[in-house]
Image (cartoon, rainbow, N blue to C red):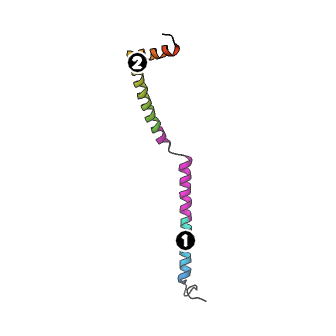
Amino acid sequence: MNSSLAIVDGRSGPLVRGRAKLTELRERAHERLCLMDARIRTLTAEPEEGAATAEYAVVLIAATGFAALLVTILKSDAIKTLLLNIVKKALNIG
């Protein structure tokens, strides 16, 4: 029998200890991979809602500012006249 595989004086040989260590490392790696997989699945199933809410707020503020700018521009007399002339030409009224 190979002495590196045998248990002598209550101690195992280097190959037995190496295999035991390898098995322990494999089990720890498997456990950590399972935890990482669970975290990834949780993050993809339930994305952060706070970030989406903040993004919507920024978009709403930008859209409101743009709408206010358009209202201001469209209230001017020059734009009213221009738009009225375009509509008249399109309808062949004037």
- Pointer 1 or 2: first along the chain: 1
Which one is nearer the viewer's eye here, 60 or 15? 60
49 with respect to 77 (left or right): right
Quarter of the view holding residue 4: bottom right
Residue 22 in the image: state x and y as whole percent: 54, 73
As drawn, the label of residue 62 is none
Height in image: 42 above or below 27? above
User: What element does badge 1 sit on?
Assistant: helix
**Residue 17 point in image, percent of width and height:** 54, 79
State whether residue 65 is above or below residue 1: above
Q: Label 2: few (<14), some or many (≥20) within 10 Å?
A: few
- Above/below status of 27 relative to 19: above
- Identify which residue is drawn at 42% across, 17% down: 82
For the residues bearing labels 1 and 2, Cβ distance under 8 angstroms:
no
For the residue pair 81 and 66, the one nearer the viewer reads as: 81
- Quarter of the image containing the N terminus? bottom right
Residue 76 occupies quadrant? top left
Q: Which residue is mark 1?
A: 24
Considering every residue shown, the one lying at the far top of the view is 94
Which residue corresponds to the image point at 40% horizontal and 25% vertical from the top-left?
Answer: 69
Residue on which disc 2 sits: 79
Nearer-the-camera pick, 61 or 89 = 89
